[in-house]
Image (cartoon, helix red, strand yellow):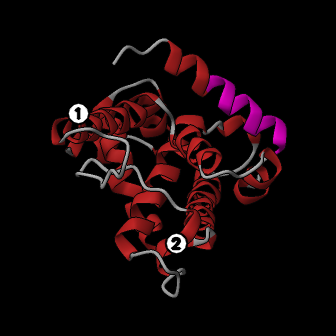
């Protein structure tokens, strides 16, 4: 690690951007305090401090990967903006989730779900529950968080416009997401 103390700030970033994991780790260690400082500004937020720091670290990684010293901003300024934006985005997403009425929420669950009428035997119920569990797993593995959220809201009966409003997206973005979901699900065999 002593070799990193000799290196300049720009050399550490340049090597980290080139894919050198040792330099990336050194940059993360060097700038973690900035992440913790920015996260501490949100101490009244509904998210836990560690979650805020984790979101800030995502912003720091994005800053390290995309920083260009030729653009005129210092890395400190640029990274602070990226970290703060990442935390604010996570808070907006967190707040959006709590604004969804509970009666409209259908969670993907892997545990046994009560399945009512329409089955002739206990075996049919177990097979149906296993199918739901398998489908839940497949959805988590193959769809993005956004696609899963759009699908969930679509399943509970929300219109494209309602989904767009809740997720702060355009109806076209919702339509595109549902088209991707359809294509992905067609290509999956259970």
Residue most extreme to the front: 120
Quick one: quadrant of the N terminus?
top left
Q: Looking at the image, which is closer to me, 188 or 177?
A: 188
Badge 2 marks a residue whose secondary structure is: helix
Q: Looking at the image, which is closer to me, 85 or 188?
A: 188
Left or right, residue 119 beside residue 161 = left
| 172 is within the stretch colored magenta | yes
Give, as a single range, the part of the protein colored magenta. 170-180
Please identify the quarter of the rendering in which residue 125 is found.
Answer: top left
Badge number at residue 127: 1
The residue positioned 78% from the left and 55% from the top of the image is: 162
> Compared with residue 131, is residue 158 higher up or lower down, i.e. above or below?
below
Left or right, residue 182 beside residue 48 = right
Badge number at residue 177: none
Left or right, residue 113 beside residue 121 = right
Mark 2 or mark 1: name the one nearer the start of the chain. Answer: 2
Residue behind mark 2: 38
Select label 2 or label 1 by which is in front: 1
The residue positioned 52% from the left and 35% from the top of the image is: 65
Badge 1 marks a residue whose secondary structure is: helix
């Amino acid at each position: 690690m002593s070799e990193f103390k000799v290196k300049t700030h720009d050399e550490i970033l340049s090597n980290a951007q080139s894919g050198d994991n040792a330099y990336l780790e050194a940059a993360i260690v060097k700038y973690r305090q900035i992440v913790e400082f920015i996260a501490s500004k949100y101490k009244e937020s509904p998210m836990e401090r560690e979650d805020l720091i984790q979101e800030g670290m995502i912003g720091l990684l994005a800053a390290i990967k995309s920083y260009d010293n030729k653009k005129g901003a210092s890395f400190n300024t640029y990274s602070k903006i990226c970290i703060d934006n990442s935390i604010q985005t996570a808070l907006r997403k967190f707040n959006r989730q709590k604004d969804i009425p509970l009666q409209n929420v259908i969670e993907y669950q892997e545990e046994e779900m009560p399945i009512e009428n329409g089955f002739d035997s206990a075996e049919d119920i177990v097979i149906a529950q296993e199918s739901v569990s398998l489908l839940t797993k497949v959805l988590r593995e193959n769809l993005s968080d956004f696609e899963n959220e759009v699908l969930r809201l679509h399943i509970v009966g929300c219109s494209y416009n309602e989904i767009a409003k809740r997720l702060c997206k355009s109806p076209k973005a919702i339509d595109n997401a549902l088209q991707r979901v359809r294509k992905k699900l067609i290509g999956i065999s259970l």
